[in-house]
């Protein structure tokens, strides 16, 4: 709600600024707020299943509203409209299989589904199964200033600042986001209005977002990266968010080239900020390598003109960071976040960005490391990272015990990530304690560290390292690699394997301690990744442990 107020209280000039671009259409801040109000009115006239009864003409009073739409202005208006009517927004992923969608909807006990027309049929079925009420989000008319028409009547009469009197705000729940389930069953993470506002203020300030920024957005909207870093914080800063509904290597390079043509000009809507997950940068590098020399030059030169390029959600391998810098001149700004507190640690916008680290805690965020024996905190040791931040979530939805266990006695959230800090105070993420930290003989090894080294091998384009159970050592190091497509094709022609374990071991001897060298090697065509480009190692471990190799 605080965010809606912020957006709505912008001056008349800002109200006319473009908030969203999608499908070649543009939507101003004025239209966004007007549409949110319309949705809020619509929500007040529904017969809703609230608890065991049916109610009408009420404020939602914390009822959950599932939002189903591809990344578009209607999605954003759906969230804002829900907040205006006192509801809790639950962004739902269109990529979820029906069982997962039903799990999320039943778990969060959704009263209303707000959907765009294109998903009406599927959502009708889902609504029947969950007892929720389906309501269609009215399409927002295109507000391109070149085809400018009069603002809608309700905007003129009410004025964008004249928002309904709201009772919910501050500590009240605003949103439930579901974890991706990498470490267990997806849990609903409840964020408050106050926490959301605190977070977007932190991000906008730290990364210097302004009304001049144009974000190219191609991330899912049910995870914090796409929702906070690339949408809510930019809107807070009056920037423009340009949605590219599906990640497309060709489309992104083209967008940058169109923004900054080779004649040295710059278009009005030129993209200034891009944020992505490491696999996106890997794919963009592959796409770049495959270009003709002239296109390569135009692409690299265009990319150089962006103000800021950021990366996160999983570890950015050093070779990828270095290649990207060679091509575009951008040292990617890597940061660290999690559904439970959104973003907490970041490399600086100005100053040294250190590869292999995620930087330092944001101002206002406290971080401490809990050593394995839990006897205290030691900034120089290795242990579990704990975070206290104004953006910390309120609770896991309807899981009071799990919530309690996730916090230390002094109110720090236990992340489950093993970390250490270097001599300059930069944090190094060693990975998820229960998926990336392998216990081999007496050693505790970081899979992320080994992955970063293996990626330097000329044949390996992607890899995933995990520990497999072993009766003698506890665990042994297993590497799954995806070979470079061109090299693999050549090896196939000569009827040779793309890479053997012996070759890999010989190569790795120079670079890794003997106990870190993989004992098992799988060569696959691709890695099974989720919408955020992450590999579910726990699931893979289970599968591979059953595979006698
Ligand atoms: N820059 C980064 N470097 C390394 N790891 C990162 C980075 N940013 C995020 N992560 C990892 O992503 C995790 C947070 O992601 P998210 O909240 O989506 O959880 P998940 O692991 O995908 O799913 P689940 O919480 O269901 O297990 C962090 O705990 C950390 O392990």
Image (spheres, helix red, strand yellow):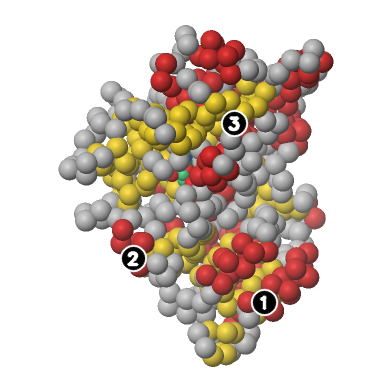
| Residue that carries the numbered disc 3 in the rendered image | 549
Q: Is residue 194 above or below residue 464?
A: below
Picture residue at 31% right of the left edge, 41% below the top: 384
Q: Is residue 441 above or below residue 106?
A: above
Alpha-carbon neighbours of circle 2 within 10 Å: few (<14), some, or many (≥20)? few
Q: Position of residue 421 (x, y in %)?
A: 31, 30
Picture residue at 17% right of the left edge, 43% below the top: 375
Q: Give 498 or 97, whichever is nearer the viewer.
A: 498
Q: Which mark is residue 331?
A: none
Q: Do we see residue 204 in this rendering?
A: no
Picture residue at 50% right of the left edge, 58% below the top: 185
Mark 2 vs 1, N-terminal side: 1
Q: Is residue 468 above or below residue 142?
A: above
Residue at mark 1 to residue at mark 3: CA–CA distance: 44 Å
Q: Secondary structure at mark 3?
A: loop
| Residue that carries the numbered disc 2 in the rendered image | 401
| Residue that carries the numbered disc 1 in the rendered image | 129
Closest to the camera, between mark 3 and mark 2, is: 3
Closest to the camera, between mark 1 and mark 3, is: 3
- Quadrant where the C terminus is found in the figure: top right
Q: Do we see residue 254 in this rendering?
A: yes
Q: Secondary structure at mark 1?
A: helix
Q: Secondary structure at mark 2?
A: helix
Mark 1 vs 3, N-terminal side: 1
């Amino acid at each position: 709600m605080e965010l809606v107020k912020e957006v709505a209280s912008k001056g008349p000039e800002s109200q006319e600024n473009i908030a969203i671009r999608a499908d070649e259409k543009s939507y101003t801040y004025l239209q966004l707020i007007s549409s949110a109000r319309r949705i809020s009115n619509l929500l007040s006239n529904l017969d809703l299943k609230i608890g065991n009864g049916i109610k009408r003409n009420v404020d939602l009073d914390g009822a959950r509203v599932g939002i189903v739409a591809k990344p578009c202005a209607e999605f954003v208006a759906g969230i804002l409209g829900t907040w205006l009517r006192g509801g809790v927004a639950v962004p739902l992923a269109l990529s979820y299989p029906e069982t997962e969608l039903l799990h999320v909807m039943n778990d969060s006990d959704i009263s209303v589904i707000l959907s765009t027309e294109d998903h009406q049929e599927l959502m009708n079925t889902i609504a029947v199964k969950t007892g929720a009420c389906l309501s269609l989000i009215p399409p927002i008319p295109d507000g391109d200033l070149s085809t400018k028409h009069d603002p809608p009547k309700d905007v003129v009469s009410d004025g964008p600042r004249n928002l309904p009197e709201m009772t919910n705000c501050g500590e009240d729940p605003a949103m439930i986001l579901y974890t991706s389930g990498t470490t267990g069953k997806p849990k609903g993470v409840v964020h408050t209005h106050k926490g959301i506002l605190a977070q977007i203020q932190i991000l906008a300030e730290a990364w210097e977002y302004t009304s001049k920024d144009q974000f190219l957005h191609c991330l899912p909207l049910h995870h914090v990266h796409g929702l906070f870093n690339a949408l809510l914080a930019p809107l807070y800063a009056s920037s423009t968010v340009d949605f590219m509904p599906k990640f497309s290597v060709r489309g992104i390079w083209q967008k940058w080239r169109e923004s900054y043509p080779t004649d040295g000009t710059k278009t009005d809507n030129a993209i200034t900020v891009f944020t992505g997950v490491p696999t996106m940068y890997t794919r963009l590098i592959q796409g770049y390598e495959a270009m003709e020399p002239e296109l390569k030059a135009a692409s690299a030169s265009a990319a150089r003109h962006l103000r800021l390029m950021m990366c996160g959600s999983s570890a950015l391998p050093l070779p990828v960071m270095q290649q990207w810098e060679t091509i575009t001149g951008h040292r990617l700004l890597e940061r660290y976040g999690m559904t439970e507190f959104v973003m907490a640690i970041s490399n600086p916008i100005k100053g040294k960005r250190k590869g292999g680290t995620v930087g330092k805690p944001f101002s206002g965020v406290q971080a401490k490391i809990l050593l394995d024996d839990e006897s205290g905190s030691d900034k120089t040791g290795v242990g579990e990272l704990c975070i206290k931040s104004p953006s910390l979530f309120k609770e896991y939805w309807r899981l009071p015990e799990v919530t309690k266990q996730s916090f230390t006695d002094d109110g720090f959230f236990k992340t489950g990530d093993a970390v250490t800090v270097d001599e300059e105070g930069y944090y190094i993420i060693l990975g998820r304690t229960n998926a990336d930290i392998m216990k081999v003989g007496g050693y505790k090894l970081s899979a992320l560290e080994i992955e970063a080294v293996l990626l330097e091998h000329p044949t390996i384009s992607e890899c995933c390292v995990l520990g497999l159970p072993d009766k003698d050592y506890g665990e042994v190091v297993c590497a799954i690699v995806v070979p470079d497509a061109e090299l693999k094709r050549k090896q196939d022609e000569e009827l040779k394997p793309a890479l053997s374990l012996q070759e890999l071991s010989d190569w790795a001897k120079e670079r890794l301690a003997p106990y870190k060298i993989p004992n098992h090697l799988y060569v696959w065509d691709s890695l099974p990744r989720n919408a955020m480009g992450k590999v579910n190692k726990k699931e893979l471990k289970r599968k591979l442990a059953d595979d006698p190799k």
